[in-house]
Amino acid sequence: MPRIIVPKGWRHLIFLIVFLMAGLGAATPMAFGAPKKPKSLDPMTLPFPENIQTMAGGGAVLVTDNHISGDRSLELFSLNPDKAYTPASILKLVTAGVALDSLGLGYRFTTGFYLDPKNNLWVVGRGDPYLISEELCLIMERLRGTGLREVNNVYLDNSFFQTGLILDGNNFTINPYDAYNLALGVNFNTVNYLIDQKGQIVECDPCAPLTQVALDIAKSNYPKKRKKGRRFPQEYRLNISSSPFDAERNTGQTLIALLERSLIKVNGDLMLGQTLPKDAKPIYIHLSSKTLEEMLKELLKHSNNFMTNQIFLTMGAEKYGAPATPEKSQRVVLEFLDKYNLPFITMVEGSGLSRRNSLTARQMARILGTLEPARSLINSTDDGQVIYKTGTMSDIQTLAGYLVRPERVNEPLSFVILLNGHYKNGTREKILAALKAHFIDHNDNPLAPESSRLSLKKAPSPKKTAKSSKKTAPKVQKSPKKTQKTAKRSAKTTVPAKDRRLFSPTESAY
């Protein structure tokens, strides 16, 4: 083969052309029509029940009709109904039901004021969750109305609750949802103050004095730098996280400051950890301005952990005597479940903060059947078709409540959604929208205009909990194949529902 001789000057040019052509050939498929990675399909566009199965993954979803003929309930849709999950704040529904049954709709908390022979004022707490600023000012008016003008020492009796009680799930943070529980606590055991335009710490409510405890907390949490867009004056509400004893001290300091402002002179000191002597005489017994029914509505609306656990602990002390302990309250819960033939659940406190609480969707559905007559206490959407309670912690999204059928408004379906693990925010709401579309709107396309999208009213929700909450629940299953089989097999299963109702129609106030 003849040898081709390329002049020296051309060699570099040929090499450059070959190099450019090779690069263009490699780039051409990318530039002209190389297949792109397909976008993931929106699960909301899938048909029912595939949309639910895809979104829920390893979570649990259950829809139950408790109004079929006979004393039985019908499961209309079921996914992982017997797997245990951490329920978070939907556990408040259980606490509310037990409280209504054990304490009664009209129950009112009491706080006693006594004088001993040495003119010392004794304040005896019995777990009132609603000793807030307005209530405290009312108490001062009543005390002055008794003719009280001067006292020596002020003694606090917190013996109705166990001393130094810290419930499981408390993460010792300054977040108000993390407050300690006391037999005598004011303003949800939080402090409220204002940083004014000059940067000074001042009180923002005349009925909530800036106590020494509050001032110490405000100073230790003073913002080092103003956040962008945040201007003073700025109001703060922080939890007394240091110890239950500081919370008790804040209660005493608040009461003394309010007594002084009411022109009732205090000559002595604040005395904590005392028990009412037999020779002390009552001068005023304060009844809470709200009944238990009204308090439950309030705590379910705002998901107030402090109020819930105050009620939870009081149930045990009322039934088995002081001091209140979690164990006494757990006994009351177990008796309630047994009374109404309901399955036992793991409930270590009443608000849902503890990750040791656990239940299954089927257990929760049975409880919802019993609580149905009290459903008017629970939040609802504007159209009234969804009655719901949310539960939120890091890696936990839950929802439980009722779907109201327009043609049978007095016979709602109950639903439970339990998601533990890594889910996108809003997954539970999308699942609920799909359930409503199928069972209420009878439209399996939740994205259709006629299928009204859900807009759940957002109550103040807890931020991500402290480091301990990083112990997450099981991860979400990536493939829904196994769960599909489970759902098909368990759909439309009938289960006994003996003694399902908490109240008979004549006893119910709802």
Image: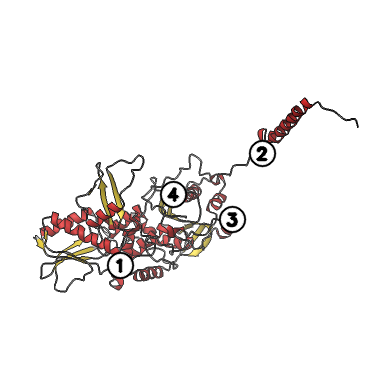
* Residue marked by disc 4: 407
The CA span between labels 2 and 4 is 50 Å
Question: Is 92 or 30 nearer to us in this picture?
Answer: 30
Q: Secondary structure at mark 2?
A: loop
The residue that disc 2 covers is 35
* Mark-to-mark CA distance, 2 and 1: 65 Å
Residue found at the far bottom of this picture? 278
Residue 274 location, x and y as percent? Answer: 21, 70
**Whether residue 504 can be seen here:** no
Does label 3 or label 4 sit earlier along the sequence?
A: 4
Element on which disc 3 rests? helix
If the image is split into quadrants, where does the C terminus sit? bottom left
Q: Earlier in the sequence, mark 2 or mark 4?
A: 2
The mark nearer the N terminus, 1 or 3, is 1
For the residues bearing labels 2 and 4, Cβ distance under 8 angstroms: no
Q: Residue 462's x, y, as percent?
A: 38, 53
* Residue 484: assigned label: 3
- Residue at x 26% of width, y 69% of height: 160
Three-letter code for the amino acid on which mark 3 is drawn: Gln
**Towards the viewer: 427 or 159:** 159
The amino acid pointed to by label 1 is Gly
Name which of mark 4 and mark 1 comes first in the sequence. Answer: 1
Q: Residues within 10 Å of mark 3 (few under 14, many from 20)?
A: some
Q: Is 108 or 419 nearer to us in this picture?
A: 419
Q: Is residue 230 above or below residue 494?
A: above
Disc 1: which residue: 164
Q: Earlier in the sequence, mark 3 or mark 2?
A: 2
Helix, strand or loop status at disc 4: loop
